Image (cartoon, rainbow, N blue to C red):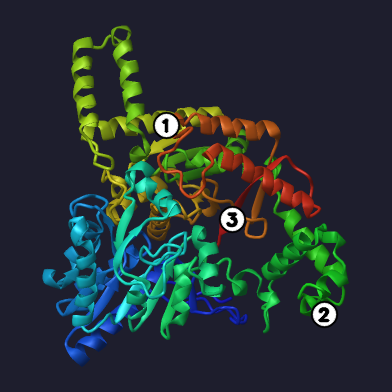
Amino acid sequence: MAKAAAGSAAPLTIESSRERERLRTVVFPEHSDLALAVAERIIEIIQRETRAKGRAVLGLATGSTPVGVYEELIRRHQAGDVDFSRVITFNLDEYYPMPPDSPHSYRRYMWENFFAHVNIAKENVHIPDGTIPRERVVEACAAYDEAIRAAGGIDFQLLGIGKTGHVGFNEPGSDATSRTRIVTLDTLTRKDAAADFFGVENVPREAITMGVATILDAREIALLATGEHKTAIVARAVEGEISTDVAATFLQRHPSVTVYLDLPAAAELTRIKTPWVLEGSVDWTPAMIERSVVWLAERSGKAVLKLAARDYAENHLSPLLARAGSAGPINGQVFNRLREKIRGRARLPAHERVLVFSPHPDDDVISMGGILRKLWENENQIVVAYMTSGNIAVFDHDVTRHLDFVTRAAASLGLDAAAMQRARAAITTGIEQKAPGDVDVPVVQHLKKFIRESEAIAALAAVGIPPSAARFLDLPFYQTGEVRKRPLSDDDIAIVLRLFDEVQPDLVFVAGDLSDPHGTHRTCKAAVERALERSKGPRPEVWLYRGAWQEWSLTEADVLVPLSQDELHAKVLAIFRHQSQKDTAPFPGYDEREFWQRVEARNLETAARADRLGLPEYYAMEAYVIQRP
């Protein structure tokens, strides 16, 4: 596969057949490339339709996926490339009931993320009304569809896809003939939204949504998906049969649909995951050979060195076998390539300057608690930079518990007990009067920040690293007090750049798991990359880690770090030090297990999988990818 040039929005070129894909699908190397391409298409539609009929009608979506598109459209508008004065918009959906000024309101989302920054007329914006009296909902839904027809129909419809395969809020069971209506939200949909609402019990049970038929009436449709957590449902929507169980499959009936994916979201498509099972040529790079042979070994239940020519012939890999002449050379090549990835402490950096970027105050020990200990033992100079405060991920009861401790300890600490009681009473009143999802008062935000910082210091100590290694960057983009964050700014990048100038690292670790629920990992990674571009010092080697949301596979990884039973235990104990995230984390993501349980299972499985392939047997393993310049 060929990668797009830097700064372009060109899709990846995949040579394999797309015979199993029922929808036109384009795959981009990065999330930002996807946003550029979709924004460019929207601009083309606006310019074409306003010239032809004096207006353009867009169907718009909310959520984290289209934010990049809206940011690019804003940038292009401010550059004078696109005029929204003759654009009419219809949004897909809204929770019900939902006040328009709620932080969870899609109306508020659209104005904050898009409409307030372009010259669109307020009267041209249409969003389902989450405050309409229930007895008028049916009438209002019919009027919404009529308004779309009166505007001449939707020229371009933007869609995301939910974990249930919903488009809009057309949950499993939605009919292809459905129109705008009120729906009951699927349990999984409400669970996925729980982090935004600070608990599933606060997520509305209903929503107003455009129906499947309303969506399919659009003249052109774009379905967007990004991130590893969307892989399974994307593959089902693109390659699966049409079914009421997955509303997105109804898009296969539309004549003009394009699915826009970043590479992680496309990972389960056949042409990406196993292109050798399709008709057509395969680019047999060393990485592709490794992937195919590991797939074959796991499929056949054999170690790599025990694969026979018959295994290749019976599993779509005869072309690879023909290139080598026999199975032995291929097996040996892949085995040696995999074995070379394993790096114990003796093969890890020593006496170097190491800079670890942790998006939240626990990502460091969750993802790389094992290697952190080894790097410290190798006498590296380590700095761990916690990029955000993580304060919104602290429950109110943790603040109350810490306040109770300080109140009880006031006399022993020489504090004014009366002043402490007054402060505690004021803070308690503020917490009690706050609705779920509301912004904390500043003092509570600060207390939650201090809780996360103290836990981070304690966790470092659990892997042998002193408090002096910690830096708390508190990047401005995160400081909203809400789930939704600001766009990355020059102020954020400048803070990271100053740290590069201070540390002058030889090796940098960056979070590479981009499926965190609110995009903080993605934003933090972008901040590091932009700071590196501006840095005038020597470029350090960059390793990407995962752990909180998923792990690198053996074939994706460049480095496999073995852990003993004691080392894995120490890593788990370090995670335990983050008490505010223990038992029930506010933002658990798409995995019901606690973070330590995910880590333990993934590290054990990585080692077990290597063992099944015939590699040296270890108790557990962490995996890393070396980012190429």
Callout 1 secondary element: helix
**Contact? badges 2 and 1 (CB < 8 Å):** no
Viewer-side label of 3, 1 = 1
Q: Which mark is first along the chain, 1 or 3?
A: 1
* Residue at image location 26% in from the left, 88% down from the top: 48
Looking at the rendered structure, the kind of residue marked 2 is Ala
Report the residue marked by disc 1: 580
The dot on residue 625 is 3
Q: Is residue 188 above or below residue 596?
A: below
Looking at the rendered structure, the kind of residue marked 3 is Val
Residue 240 visible in image:
yes
Q: Position of residue 276 (x, y in %)?
A: 70, 75
Q: Quadrant of the N terminus?
A: bottom right
User: Can you name the residue that lies furthest to the bottom here?
Assistant: 52
The dot on residue 369 is none
Report the residue marked by disc 2: 322
